[in-house]
Image (cartoon, rainbow, N blue to C red):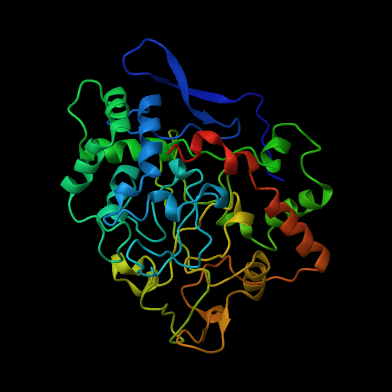
Amino acid sequence: MRLRLAPFAIFIAACVPGGGETQSALRVPPNFPAPRIPEDNPLTVAKVELGRHLFYDVRLSDNETQSCASCHRQEFAFTDGLPRGVGSTGEAHPRGSMSLANVAYSATLGWANPVLTRLEDQALVPMFGEEPVELGLRDQETLLARLRAEPRYDMLFSDAYPDEEAPTLGQVVDALGSFQRTLISGNSAYDRYIAGERSAMSAEALRGLELFEGEDLECFHCHGGFNFSSSVDHAGNVFDQATFQNNGLYNVDGRGAYPPDNPGVAEFTNEFVDQGAFKPPTLRNIAVTAPYMHDGSLATLNDVIDMYAAGGQLTREGPNTGDGRTNPNKSIFVTGFTLTEEDRAALLAFLNSLTDERFLSDPRFSNPW
């Protein structure tokens, strides 16, 4: 097993605007590296608190029916429990809402966008994007007028930006990015075990960890490291670690094609070899983020295990009929395997050990309204 022990937590101090005190704006678990914080958007306690209010505010949708939190609910590790997202106008999205747990460590943002790397830039997509419509804002002035009309924001913006005229759209996205960087999950049974609490994981879960990190199942190649994803970034990164993988979920034409509304990275590169290539998401809190895959097509973790055990998904009917097991673009690590019922139970026990109950109810991340 690839285990590292670390005896102490890392705290990143952030200055409180207008005062000399410092407080912990970011709690980094002992087995995590320090996240990368943009130089042009330093993390402050006041900015994080402003971002938390904005994250839960329905004023950020054109019809004032949805907030960021509508599709990213804390109890579901900041997913929404739906197969595919649904926007403020009722439009169904082609993909599910990704977890925001440890999004500060994401090398890229979204399921298959290789160029979107900053949370500040990403925030503009759900706010103003039209394909699909998410929050559906049509202009920034409407948003800023709403924020000016809410008395609570007077102090929140002045605390976060004491020397600037506020509010501005730039301040909004900077604050949202700051809050999201604090959504760090690292207090699961697994984390407590590697920190030295040997009773935190059961013998069955430890057996599951061995299977997960073994060459028979190959899980760790795409879901390894401290965040259980091969696509990571942090302050110590020197090389680009953005990765996208085809896991054999579809093969609609027998030659590697994915459904037209979900082509993967090929949507940006126009390269057929990138059909079906998606970012390996973090497996942290995976037990509470069902359904699974980019399109929510697998309902349970058992379904996911079945797919990987088969070396891909065989779709027998419907518009996506095809044998993903023979997809020519499929990752070399998705080859199939055999599990006993005891092994399956152990693997599930390990995956459940990645649930961070404190994260799912931490008041620092909850709705302040």
Asked whether, in this view, residue 335 is left or right of residue 57, the answer is right
Which residue is at a point 30% across and 47% down the rendered structure image?
59
Q: How many numbered discs, if any? A: 0
The residue closer to the viewer here, 32 or 81, is 81
Which residue is at a point 29% across and 32% down the rendered structure image?
151
Where is residue 197? Give x, y as percent: 76, 33
The residue closer to the viewer here, 369 or 341, is 369
Q: Where 48 sits versus 105, above or below?
A: above
> Which quadrant would residue 287 be assigned to in this image?
bottom right
| Placement of the C terminus among the 4 image quadrants | top left
Which residue is at a point 53% across and 61% down the rendered structure image?
81
Where is residue 55? Give x, y as percent: 38, 43
Which residue is at a point 52% across and 23% down the rendered structure image?
11
Where is residue 134? Give x, y as percent: 33, 60
> Which quadrant would residue 38 be assigned to in this image?
top left
The residue closer to the viewer here, 248 or 90, is 90
Query: Which residue occupies the extreme bottom position in the image?
Result: 317
Asked whether, in this view, residue 341 is left or right of residue 67, the answer is right
Whether residue 115 is visible: no
Q: Where 108 sits versus 357, above or below?
A: below
Q: Where 151 sits versus 276, above or below?
A: above
Q: Where 240 sits versus 287, above or below?
A: above
Whether residue 224 is visible: yes
Where is residue 90? Give x, y as percent: 36, 68
